[in-house]
Image: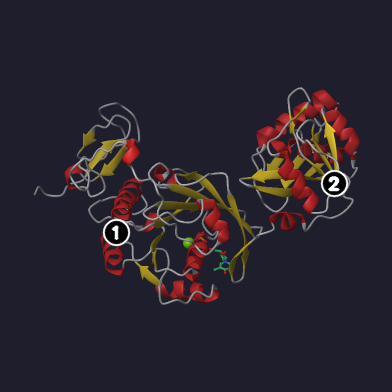
Amino acid sequence: MAKKKTMYVCQSCGADFARWSGKCDACGQWNTLVEEVPRAESNGRGARSATGDARVYPITRVDAREDERLSTGLGELDRVLGGGIVPGSMILLGGDPGIGKSTLMMQLGRAAMRILYVSGEESLKQIKLRAERLAVSDEEFLVLAETNLDSILRAIDERKPALVIIDSIQTVFRPELESAPGSIAQVRESTAILLRYAKSVNIPMVIIGHVTKDGVIAGPRILEHMVDTVLQFEGDHHHSYRIVRGLKNRFGSTNEIGIFEMRADGLREVNNPSEVFLSDRSRGISGSCVTCSLEGTRALLLEVQALVTPSNYGMPQRTVSGLDARRVSLLLAVLEKRFGLRVGQYDVFVNIAGGVRIDEPAVDLAVCAAIVSSARDQAVDHGTAVVGEVGLGGEVRPVGQLEKRVIEAEKLGFRRILVPRGGITHKKSRGIDIIEVDLLAEALEKLL
Ligand code: TYD
Ligand code: MG
């Protein structure tokens, strides 16, 4: 066998070189060379399949019955995964450092299955301290503090766990590669090998990846197309709520979210999110409006908050959190043109209470209502919720699954809900007044 040698492959044109350089001599691109193990020696990839023969089947003969999924013991997480973990699948859990990824994964230790938790970030002692805090004490929760990929694979082979957790992929390295752990080459190669191994022995794996603020380099982004499922763990450090969001899922839908609260003894599932997100609302204050957003199969009531104040500096500020800032700018332009609201000399702050992030246009009308409410210093009625997308013409546009949203608002004791016209068939015999609107201006007049 030839001596092991690394090479550098251009990610742009595919040319390979014996040594690294900032510029590819073949195509002239900069920063495109990435270290790789020559293909013939690589475990991670190769033209031949594992068994060596290619079997072709008619589609009618393929067995598509799903293997039984593993429950994580956390209903919120199972739902995001599409009903549990699929055997042999690989899940990437991404998120900012300190958000609670290790905590979430260690809590799976309460589920009844053999788990191998591999940590390259913490010592066994640190892991033990966390386990005590989380009340994880199970003979079947196996821990390994290791970063060498070969040793990790050997441990999996010996212990045959039902689930492997790698915390984090940035610390794992393959000794054959000269690049440092955490480099693109190491992260991609380690993932490829783990992935192939997971599929061949049918053991599912969760790999944790840090998303670094400054970039894509060595972040888990490059892995997204390799793995089966990508979960994002988000939330902000000032709030205790954490959300698991599916960004990609080969075995389920991607619009489900799971909601948790970080407590002193770990993450607690939040089963009634609307109540929680509305719990801190104060009555009679201007700049607040409740809306109902749809997250996957669940309707979620949220409070939109706005603050409009005279600008003390030359350039008025637009500060948005929890929403798309460009969407808010667009709504401000519509409010100006179609409703006559002048905020050119004002700072505008818009926020979703509780640190949640919403991407749905169905919250538009509530955003407009909160802004106008603050600008006029006039509170929106406490018992009213507002749903509707706002178009550029100042019209209120229909939103999906209106019925579900109305039911959620009714369930939480709202007396009145403003909705786009035409979405609701039976309006009678309900505990909530349904008010249909066509235009933004009309809706705002009804609210304020
Ligand atoms: P951690 O899981 O270490 O984050 P990550 O793996 O994503 O970097 O979580 C770290 C934070 O969570 C830390 O600030 C302490 C807090 N925490 C709790 O509030 N309660 C707990 O029970 C645990 C274990 C951590
Ligand atoms: Mg961690």
Residue at the spot x=33%, y=37% of the render?
59
Q: Residue drawn 69% across and 47% down?
A: 299
**Which amino acid, mark 2?**
Ile
Residue 118 on image: x %, y %: 38, 65
Q: Which residue is mark 2?
A: 432
Q: Is residue 236 left or right of residue 167?
A: right
Q: Is residue 344 left or right of residue 194?
A: right
Badge 2 element = loop
Relative height, residue 93 to residue 342 (above, below): below
Q: Amino acid at mark 1?
A: Leu
Ligand 1 appears in which quadrant? Answer: bottom right
Instruction: Name the residue at 69% across, 41% down.
Output: 320
Query: Is the residue marked by circle 1 packed among few (<14), some (14-19), or many (20+) residues within 10 Å?
Result: some
Distance between mark 2 and mark 1 Cα atoms: 59 Å
Which class describes the residues within 10 Å of circle 2: few (<14), some (14-19), or many (20+)?
A: many
Q: Residue under circle 1?
A: 149
Residue 411 or residue 282, whichever sits in front: 411
Q: 96 or 293: which is nearer to us?
A: 293
